[in-house]
């Protein structure tokens, strides 16, 4: 059943292409139905799922000579991300309702991307995973290059060419990362005996420790590029800012999660020995784990600090993604149950919240005012003119800075718990990162929406908020609040899976039971 | 008395539901939303008084408690309950919010959104004062900040953007420090429950667990948690956000901030710092005492030189809460002297309550004055008001004298008991802080002289006195000041068991 999330997305893409650019309304409805169906299937699967089990969805030989299978399966972690994909995809379609130019092609690319993303989250065979991973990367380039927006010249000094530049940069970074990943996967295949590409089989293969020690960083960095790990993050803010709203929602919402998911599912699961101490220290760092934790920490603080001084509203959110994804990577590096749980939850949470922030900035504000410059937005009395957008942004900002009651709190607080256990001094630095996060979010919010008082009259008119926008906002807000108030919804999926045999190696490396 | 009915859940959710209803009602008729807001605040006060009535003053266990699992793997439970401290805070909050909502009645700028935010703030405060699990408590602690921010930001004066941001960021710094400290405690002990943690701290288990699991000293965590409450209270030198915020906020909002929100800090000292960090408070006692003295003396001097009445009373607010901090700190004493500790702690609670209603009343009077003068509120803008507004001057005079601690009014028993308890326990700091008491008298009398006496400023010669409605609105509050001044036992009674338990049991 779950496999249909993938097939339906590809079928939907085909249907959108066939319906063509001439019938935009039909295309939109096709896209909406496809994504809603995906969300429905994902929800049904989550409801039926027995905690801890690994669902086998499809398993057929594919290239038997090399031991490659068409092997789709899901555990609790995959399901959380599949659910996220369903939510983000549906909301993304609702916020792309106003795409009028080449609508058919837009949604064809969009749904292809979604299909690839579902595929990655459900693949239990490395080659299959890699194929889906590439399928997800290619449409991104076109979505940005064709439908993207030029940056504000006033904000950055350079203009029009930015979207091509951003799209190209994103594609090149992604492919460079993929190259590393592919090299790592092939090495694992060879060293593993050349018999299988199956995730479970390889996870139980005893790779030599020195092999893991060099292949782990290769694969981890390859995936972490897409997760926005500092210093490989530079594609992210520009890419987010240049992309059309729906695409930035997907980019921040699910594509960055592909990277983080790959780090956990492939790099850390297959090569846990790579996290072990080197036996010597360089600059106080004694293992790859220390190195990546430090990079994650730098990402948290650096992303937030840079966001603090941006004038382009979308770049603020773009850099905030770097900061929030830092929490995911930091959580992964804690190697304890609560930290990993927090990391997976943060993937979900950031997917929903970043999607919402981009929706407000890109669709509700930019598409109406045609500016993203905070200094130009300030005198527009936006809280008065489009109060719905202001309220949604306030709630999204609260969620983003991790106030309790929203999913971000549950996630970040678990990551911090894990960090306290694993590397206590980092907690203080991460705390500073959170504070800078509060500062930039609040700065952008007050500048864009609340510079004028509510009693000052509305000086101009903007098109009212449409129903698709409202529905999308409710969907995303509902998701973050539901998890915030009842975290067991997702924790009960994630925790038992972290204790499954698949993570035996990682569990031993982290020493948790 | 363990009541099966979830009173506390009801009182916390009621203002939230009320806020939604006020917003909806505001879509049709602004007047309805006003009436509805007053009705909700009154209903909350009724429930609070009902709790007061049914509260068993002789019991030291948490009453009206409810406990449900929430997210067990995170140590999150829905655990609420009140002892004497919680009860007092809930009643105070209900009174102050009702005062503020009534005060907003006549202000045409305060529409449905304003009232809804005020009610949300009330819900946050109720939650903070009743939740007994850290995560659950922290939810409300933060929740109350958001409406407060917007009330200041959107309805405040010209400089409100800066003031509200400063307020928000300062408080967030404290909150994050607090959160990180509690995460460490959870990692070491596996629980977020205040009562369990207090028991563990009492038996010394907590310190051992922290050493064993994290190799951090409790002292670091104590200072982190202290920061959270010190910013909120505020304690000098973490107070700099306060004067600007109180002055820039609309006076009706300042009523909420000073009357109810500033008590969150004192509540944190009593509910969290003293029970969970007893040893650390004891070891940090000397610096804490001098911080408290600084919070009493310096703001009193600062208040003397302010030219803005709102700023004067804002500094006075820091000064008054400084007495509370002093009372809390002296109670952290090694030697016995349970009677003195009990006196000081009773004084703290009386002072908390009295300051809550008095400060709220003072800002209410300022709101009335500001509305008549069209925004003027400088110390030198007025003069001779008693000639044209005798009723206003008289009633505000009562509130000022209550703030000053005149015997017979509610401000006196609290300050008296704090000093009575503090002097034997910490003679030097207490002596120095008397200076603050003196300066308080100086600046308050100065306000009376400059505003009410002297030559009448011709500009205001047509200023109307209080209307009958306004008199009726403020009268109950003034009556309460008088009542508590004459019969402090009214409050000291219900909190007695709680205070005695602290004074006797706490291993200070």
Image (cartoon, grey):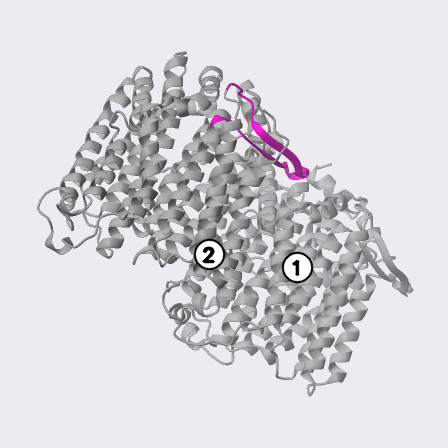
The numbered mark at residue A257 is 1
- Give how far across and how far down residue A77 sits, in percent: 73, 52
**How crowded is the residue under tag 1: few (<14 C-alpha within 10 Å), some, or many (20+)?**
many
What span is in magenta? B58-84
Query: Is residue B332 among the parts visible in the rendering?
Result: yes
Please identify the residue farthest to the front as the structure is shown. Answer: B468
Q: Where, by quadrant of the figure, is residue A224 drawn?
A: bottom right
Q: What SS does tag 2 mark?
A: helix
Q: Is residue A89 left or right of residue B476?
A: right
The residue depicted at 13 percent of the width and 56 percent of the height is B459
Residue A147 part of the magenta segment: no
Please identify the residue farthest to the left as the structure is shown. Answer: B455
Question: Which quadrant is home to the C terminus of chain B?
Answer: top left
The residue depicted at 42 percent of the width and 44 percent of the height is B171
Relative depth, front residue between A363 and A263: A363
Q: Chain of mark 1?
A: A
The residue depicted at 71 percent of the width and 57 percent of the height is A81
């Amino acid at each position: 059943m779950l496999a249909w999330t993938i097939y339906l997305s590809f079928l939907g893409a085909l249907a959108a292409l066939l319906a063509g650019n001439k019938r935009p309304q039909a295309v939109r409805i096709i896209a909406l139905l496809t994504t809603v169906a995906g969300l429905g299937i994902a929800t049904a699967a989550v409801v039926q799922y027995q905690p801890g089990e690994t669902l086998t969805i499809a398993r057929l030989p594919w290239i038997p000579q090399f031991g490659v299978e068409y092997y789709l399966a899901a555990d609790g972690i995959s399901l959380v991300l599949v659910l996220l994909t369903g939510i983000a995809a549906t909301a993304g379609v609702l916020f792309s309702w106003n795409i009028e130019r080449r609508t058919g092609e837009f949604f064809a690319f969009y749904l292809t991307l979604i299909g690839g993303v579902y595929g990655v989250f459900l693949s239990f065979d490395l080659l299959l995973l890699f194929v889906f991973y590439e399928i997800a990367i290619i449409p991104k380039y076109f979505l940005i290059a064709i439908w993207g927006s030029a940056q504000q010249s006033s904000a950055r000094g350079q203009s029009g060419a930015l979207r091509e530049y951003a799209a190209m940069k994103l594609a090149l970074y992604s492919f460079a990362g993929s190259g590393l990943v592919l090299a790592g996967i092939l090495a694992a295949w060879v060293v593993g005996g050349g018999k299988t590409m199956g995730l479970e089989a390889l996870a139980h293969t005893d790779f030599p420790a020195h092999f893991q020690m060099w292949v782990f960083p290769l694969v981890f960095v390859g995936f972490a590029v897409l997760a926005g790990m500092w210093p490989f993050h530079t594609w992210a803010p520009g890419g987010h800012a240049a992309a059309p709203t729906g695409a930035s929602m997907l980019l921040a919402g699910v594509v960055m999660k592909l990277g983080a998911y790959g780090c956990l599912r492939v790099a850390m699961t297959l090569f846990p020995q790579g996290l072990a101490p080197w036996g010597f220290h360089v600059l106080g760092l004694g293992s790859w784990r220390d190195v990546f934790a430090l990079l994650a920490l730098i990402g948290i603080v650096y992303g937030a600090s840079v966001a603090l001084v941006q004038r382009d509203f979308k770049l603020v959110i773009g850099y905030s993604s770097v900061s929030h994804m830092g929490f995911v990577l930091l959580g992964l590096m804690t190697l304890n149950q609560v930290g990993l749980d927090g990391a997976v939850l943060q993937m979900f949470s950031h997917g929903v919240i970043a999607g919402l922030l981009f929706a407000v900035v890109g669709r509700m504000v930019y598409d109406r005012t045609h500016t993203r410059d905070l200094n130009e937005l300030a005198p527009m009395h936006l809280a008065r003119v489009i109060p719905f957008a202001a309220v949604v942004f306030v709630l999204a900002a609260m969620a983003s800075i991790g106030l309790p009651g929203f999913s971000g709190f549950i996630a970040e607080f678990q990551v911090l718990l894990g960090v306290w256990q694993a590397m206590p001094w980092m907690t203080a630095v991460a705390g500073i990162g959170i504070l800078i996060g509060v500062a930039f979010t609040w700065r952008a919010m007050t500048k864009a929406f609340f510079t004028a008082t509510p009693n000052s009259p509305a000086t101009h008119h903007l098109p009212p908020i449409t129903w698709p926008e409202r529905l999308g906002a409710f969907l995303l807000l509902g998701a973050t609040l539901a998890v915030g108030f009842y975290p067991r919804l997702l924790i009960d999926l994630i925790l038992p899976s972290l204790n499954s045999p698949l993570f035996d190696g990682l569990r031993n490396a982290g020493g948790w039971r | 008395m363990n009541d099966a009915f979830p009173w506390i859940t009801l009182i916390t959710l009621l203002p939230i539901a009320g806020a939604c209803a006020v917003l909806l009602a505001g879509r049709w008729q602004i007047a309805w939303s006003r009436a509805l807001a007053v009705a909700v605040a009154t209903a909350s006060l009724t429930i609070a008084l009902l709790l007061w009535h049914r509260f068993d003053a002789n019991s030291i266990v948490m009453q009206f408690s409810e406990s449900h699992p929430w997210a067990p793997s995170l140590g999150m439970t829905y655990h609420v309950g009140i002892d004497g401290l919680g009860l007092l805070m809930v009643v105070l909050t209900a009174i102050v919010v009702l005062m503020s909502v009534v005060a907003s009645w006549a202000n045409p700028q305060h529409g449905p959104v304003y009232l809804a935010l005020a009610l949300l703030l009330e819900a946050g405060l109720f939650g903070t004062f009743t939740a007994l699990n850290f995560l659950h408590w922290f939810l409300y602690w933060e929740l109350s900040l958001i409406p407060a921010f917007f009330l200041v930001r959107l309805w405040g004066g010209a400089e409100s953007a800066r003031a509200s941001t400063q307020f928000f960021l300062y408080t967030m710094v404290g909150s994050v420090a607090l959160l990180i400290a509690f995460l460490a405690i959870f990692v070491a002990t596996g629980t977020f429950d205040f009562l369990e943690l207090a028991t563990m701290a009492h038996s010394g288990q907590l310190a051992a667990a922290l050493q064993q699991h994290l190799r951090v000293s409790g002292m670091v965590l104590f200072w982190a948690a202290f920061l959270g409450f010190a910013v909120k209270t505020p304690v000098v030198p973490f107070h700099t956000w306060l004067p600007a915020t109180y002055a820039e906020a609309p006076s009706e909002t300042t009523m909420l901030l000073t009357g109810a929100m500033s008590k969150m800090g004192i509540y944190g000292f009593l509910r969290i710092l003293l029970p969970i960090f007893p040893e650390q408070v004891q070891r940090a006692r000397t610096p804490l005492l001098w911080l408290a003295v600084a919070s009493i003396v310096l703001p009193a001097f600062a208040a003397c030189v302010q030219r803005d009445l709102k700023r004067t009373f804002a500094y006075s607010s820091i000064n008054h809460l400084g007495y509370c901090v002093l009372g809390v700190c002296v109670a952290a004493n090694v030697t016995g002297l349970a009677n003195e500790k009990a006196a000081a702690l009773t004084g703290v609670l009386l002072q908390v309550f009295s300051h809550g209603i008095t400060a709220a009343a003072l800002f209410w009077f300022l709101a009335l004055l500001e509305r008549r003068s069209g925004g003027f509120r400088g110390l030198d803008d007025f003069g001779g008001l008693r000639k044209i507004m005798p009723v206003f001057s008289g009633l505000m005079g009562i509130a000022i004298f209550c703030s000053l601690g005149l015997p017979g009014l509610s401000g006196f028993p609290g300050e008296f008991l704090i000093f009575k308890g503090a002097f034997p326990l910490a003679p030097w700091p207490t002596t120095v802080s008397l200076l603050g008491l003196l300066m308080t008298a100086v600046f308050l009398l100065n306000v009376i002289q400059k505003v009410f006496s002297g030559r009448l400023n011709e500009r205001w010669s047509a200023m109307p006195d209080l209307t009958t409605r306004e008199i009726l609105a403020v009268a109950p509050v003034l009556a309460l000041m008088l009542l508590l001044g004459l019969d402090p036992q009214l409050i000291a009674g219900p909190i007695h068991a709680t205070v005695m338990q602290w004074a006797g049991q706490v291993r200070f």
